[in-house]
Image: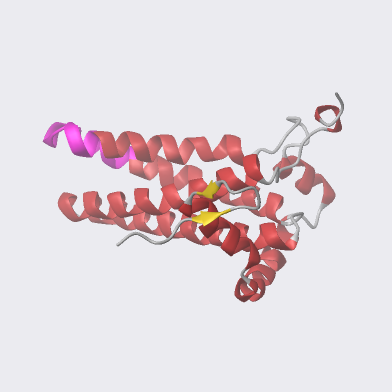
Protein backbone atom coordinates (compact mmCIF):
# COMPACT_ATOMS: atom_id res chain seq x y z
CA UNK A 1 0.00 0.00 0.00
CA UNK A 2 1.43 3.38 -1.01
CA UNK A 3 2.04 6.08 1.57
CA UNK A 4 -0.15 9.14 1.55
CA UNK A 5 1.37 11.89 -0.61
CA UNK A 6 2.78 15.01 1.05
CA UNK A 7 1.75 18.43 -0.27
CA UNK A 8 3.52 21.77 0.03
CA UNK A 9 1.90 25.09 1.03
CA UNK A 10 0.41 25.65 -2.43
CA UNK A 11 -1.01 22.14 -2.77
CA UNK A 12 1.66 20.66 -5.02
CA UNK A 13 2.61 17.06 -4.36
CA UNK A 14 6.13 16.75 -2.90
CA UNK A 15 8.16 13.83 -4.31
CA UNK A 16 9.28 11.32 -1.64
CA UNK A 17 13.00 12.00 -2.24
CA UNK A 18 12.42 15.72 -1.75
CA UNK A 19 10.53 15.05 1.47
CA UNK A 20 13.34 12.74 2.66
CA UNK A 21 15.95 15.39 1.89
CA UNK A 22 13.94 18.05 3.69
CA UNK A 23 13.71 15.74 6.70
CA UNK A 24 17.52 15.41 6.67
CA UNK A 25 17.83 19.20 6.67
CA UNK A 26 15.78 19.32 9.88
CA UNK A 27 17.26 16.22 11.61
CA UNK A 28 18.94 17.59 14.72
CA UNK A 29 20.20 14.10 15.49
CA UNK A 30 22.76 14.75 12.73
CA UNK A 31 24.18 17.82 14.48
CA UNK A 32 26.82 15.97 16.53
CA UNK A 33 28.30 13.93 13.66
CA UNK A 34 28.03 17.01 11.43
CA UNK A 35 29.95 19.03 14.00
CA UNK A 36 32.66 16.34 14.17
CA UNK A 37 32.97 16.33 10.39
CA UNK A 38 33.11 20.11 10.56
CA UNK A 39 36.21 19.87 12.75
CA UNK A 40 37.93 17.74 10.12
CA UNK A 41 36.86 20.20 7.45
CA UNK A 42 38.19 23.05 9.57
CA UNK A 43 41.63 21.46 9.61
CA UNK A 44 41.53 21.06 5.83
CA UNK A 45 40.86 24.78 5.31
CA UNK A 46 42.90 26.14 8.22
CA UNK A 47 45.53 27.57 5.87
CA UNK A 48 43.97 30.31 3.67
CA UNK A 49 46.09 29.44 0.63
CA UNK A 50 45.12 25.75 0.88
CA UNK A 51 41.47 26.72 1.40
CA UNK A 52 41.48 28.88 -1.74
CA UNK A 53 43.15 26.11 -3.74
CA UNK A 54 40.76 23.37 -2.54
CA UNK A 55 37.65 25.51 -2.89
CA UNK A 56 38.56 26.41 -6.47
CA UNK A 57 38.94 30.17 -6.07
CA UNK A 58 41.44 29.99 -8.96
CA UNK A 59 38.79 28.24 -11.06
CA UNK A 60 35.98 30.67 -10.29
CA UNK A 61 33.72 28.10 -8.63
CA UNK A 62 33.78 25.05 -6.43
CA UNK A 63 36.34 22.43 -7.44
CA UNK A 64 34.57 19.57 -5.66
CA UNK A 65 31.80 18.93 -8.24
CA UNK A 66 34.37 18.89 -11.05
CA UNK A 67 36.48 16.28 -9.27
CA UNK A 68 33.54 14.02 -8.43
CA UNK A 69 33.09 13.34 -12.14
CA UNK A 70 36.30 11.30 -12.18
CA UNK A 71 35.44 8.52 -9.69
CA UNK A 72 31.84 8.45 -10.89
CA UNK A 73 32.98 8.08 -14.50
CA UNK A 74 35.56 5.40 -13.72
CA UNK A 75 33.14 3.40 -11.58
CA UNK A 76 30.29 3.71 -14.07
CA UNK A 77 32.58 2.51 -16.86
CA UNK A 78 33.72 -0.43 -14.74
CA UNK A 79 30.10 -1.36 -14.05
CA UNK A 80 29.27 -1.29 -17.77
CA UNK A 81 32.24 -3.58 -18.49
CA UNK A 82 31.19 -5.88 -15.65
CA UNK A 83 27.67 -6.18 -17.00
CA UNK A 84 28.31 -6.44 -20.74
CA UNK A 85 32.05 -6.86 -21.32
CA UNK A 86 32.56 -10.51 -20.51
CA UNK A 87 35.69 -12.14 -19.08
CA UNK A 88 38.07 -10.32 -21.43
CA UNK A 89 37.07 -6.97 -19.93
CA UNK A 90 37.83 -7.95 -16.31
CA UNK A 91 41.36 -6.44 -16.25
CA UNK A 92 40.05 -3.16 -17.66
CA UNK A 93 37.17 -3.09 -15.17
CA UNK A 94 39.60 -3.72 -12.32
CA UNK A 95 41.81 -0.86 -13.50
CA UNK A 96 38.79 1.44 -13.72
CA UNK A 97 37.71 0.55 -10.18
CA UNK A 98 41.25 1.31 -8.94
CA UNK A 99 41.29 4.66 -10.75
CA UNK A 100 37.93 5.51 -9.20
CA UNK A 101 39.20 4.79 -5.70
CA UNK A 102 42.35 6.81 -6.35
CA UNK A 103 40.51 9.83 -7.76
CA UNK A 104 37.97 9.76 -4.93
CA UNK A 105 40.65 11.10 -2.58
CA UNK A 106 40.90 14.62 -4.06
CA UNK A 107 37.11 14.69 -4.44
CA UNK A 108 36.79 13.97 -0.71
CA UNK A 109 39.33 16.60 0.31
CA UNK A 110 37.69 19.30 -1.82
CA UNK A 111 34.32 18.26 -0.40
CA UNK A 112 35.65 18.93 3.11
CA UNK A 113 36.77 22.37 1.93
CA UNK A 114 33.22 23.17 0.79
CA UNK A 115 31.64 21.64 3.91
CA UNK A 116 33.65 23.93 6.17
CA UNK A 117 31.63 26.96 5.08
CA UNK A 118 28.07 25.63 5.03
CA UNK A 119 25.21 26.48 7.35
CA UNK A 120 23.74 23.94 9.78
CA UNK A 121 20.89 22.55 7.68
CA UNK A 122 23.35 22.02 4.80
CA UNK A 123 25.87 20.44 7.17
CA UNK A 124 23.26 17.84 8.11
CA UNK A 125 22.67 16.88 4.50
CA UNK A 126 26.39 17.22 3.79
CA UNK A 127 27.18 14.73 6.54
CA UNK A 128 24.84 12.13 5.01
CA UNK A 129 26.29 12.96 1.57
CA UNK A 130 29.80 12.35 2.92
CA UNK A 131 28.78 9.17 4.75
CA UNK A 132 27.11 7.58 1.73
CA UNK A 133 30.04 8.50 -0.49
CA UNK A 134 32.49 7.14 2.09
CA UNK A 135 30.48 3.91 1.98
CA UNK A 136 30.81 3.90 -1.80
CA UNK A 137 34.59 4.31 -1.58
CA UNK A 138 34.87 1.48 0.95
CA UNK A 139 32.68 -0.78 -1.20
CA UNK A 140 34.70 -0.04 -4.34
CA UNK A 141 37.99 -0.53 -2.46
CA UNK A 142 36.62 -3.88 -1.25
CA UNK A 143 35.62 -4.67 -4.83
CA UNK A 144 39.16 -3.92 -5.95
CA UNK A 145 40.59 -6.20 -3.28
CA UNK A 146 38.23 -9.01 -4.28
CA UNK A 147 39.05 -8.60 -7.97
CA UNK A 148 42.79 -8.65 -7.27
CA UNK A 149 42.27 -11.84 -5.23
CA UNK A 150 40.70 -13.47 -8.30
CA UNK A 151 37.19 -13.26 -6.82
CA UNK A 152 35.61 -11.31 -9.64
CA UNK A 153 31.97 -12.22 -8.88
CA UNK A 154 32.02 -10.83 -5.33
CA UNK A 155 33.98 -7.86 -6.68
CA UNK A 156 31.18 -7.09 -9.12
CA UNK A 157 28.54 -7.36 -6.38
CA UNK A 158 30.54 -5.02 -4.13
CA UNK A 159 30.86 -2.56 -7.02
CA UNK A 160 27.11 -2.66 -7.63
CA UNK A 161 26.53 -1.91 -3.93
CA UNK A 162 29.07 0.90 -4.23
CA UNK A 163 27.19 2.27 -7.21
CA UNK A 164 24.00 2.34 -5.16
CA UNK A 165 25.71 4.24 -2.33
CA UNK A 166 27.34 6.66 -4.77
CA UNK A 167 23.95 7.29 -6.38
CA UNK A 168 22.42 8.31 -3.05
CA UNK A 169 25.47 10.45 -2.30
CA UNK A 170 25.27 12.02 -5.74
CA UNK A 171 21.60 12.86 -5.28
CA UNK A 172 22.38 14.63 -2.02
CA UNK A 173 25.37 16.39 -3.56
CA UNK A 174 23.17 17.56 -6.40
CA UNK A 175 20.65 18.86 -3.88
CA UNK A 176 23.36 20.78 -2.06
CA UNK A 177 24.85 22.34 -5.17
CA UNK A 178 21.75 22.91 -7.30
CA UNK A 179 18.92 23.09 -4.77
CA UNK A 180 20.67 24.82 -1.88
CA UNK A 181 23.36 26.65 -3.92
CA UNK A 182 26.13 25.38 -1.65
CA UNK A 183 29.55 25.90 -3.16
CA UNK A 184 32.08 28.62 -3.53
CA UNK A 185 31.88 30.81 -6.60
CA UNK A 186 33.47 33.96 -7.85
CA UNK A 187 31.57 37.14 -6.91
CA UNK A 188 31.19 37.92 -10.62
CA UNK A 189 28.62 35.10 -10.79
CA UNK A 190 26.51 36.92 -8.20
CA UNK A 191 26.23 40.07 -10.33
CA UNK A 192 23.69 40.26 -13.14
Quadrant location, the C terminus: top right
Q: Position of residue 21 (x, y in %)?
A: 55, 56
Q: Nearer the viewer, residue 21 or 19?
A: 19
As for residue 93 lying within the magenta part, the answer is: yes
Q: Position of residue 82 (x, y in %)?
A: 21, 39
Question: Please, is residue 88 above or below residue 1 in the view?
Answer: above
Q: Nearer the viewer, residue 118 or 50?
A: 118
Furthest-left residue in this view: 87
What residue do we see at 29% from left, 49% from top? 160
**On the picture, is 105 further left or further right than 95?**
right
Q: Position of residue 164 (x, y in %)?
A: 36, 51
Tell me which corner region of the image, top left, top right, bottom left or bottom right, holds residue 56. top right
Q: Nearer the viewer, residue 50 or 22?
A: 22
**On the picture, is 71 further left or further right than 75?**
right
As for residue 160 lying within the magenta part, the answer is: no
What residue do we see at 14% from left, 32% from top? 88
Tell me which corner region of the image, top left, top right, bottom left or bottom right, holds residue 135. bottom left
Quadrant location, the N terminus: bottom left
Q: Nearer the viewer, residue 98 or 31?
A: 31
**On the picture, is 7 further left or further right than 118?**
left
Q: How many marks?
A: 0
Whether residue 70 can be seen here: yes
Residues rendered magenta in the picture: 81-96
Furthest-top residue in this view: 192
Its colouring scheme is: secondary structure
Q: Position of residue 47 (x, y in %)?
A: 81, 53
Q: Identify the main secondary structure in magenta.
A: helix
**On the picture, is 101 further left or further right than 59?**
left
Whether residue 106 can be seen here: no
Amino acid sequence: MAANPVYDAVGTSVPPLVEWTRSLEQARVLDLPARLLGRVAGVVVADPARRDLLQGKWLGHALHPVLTDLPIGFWTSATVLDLVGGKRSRPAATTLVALGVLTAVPAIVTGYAEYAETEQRDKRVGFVHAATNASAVVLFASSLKARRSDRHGPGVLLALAGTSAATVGGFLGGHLSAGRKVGTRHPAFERG
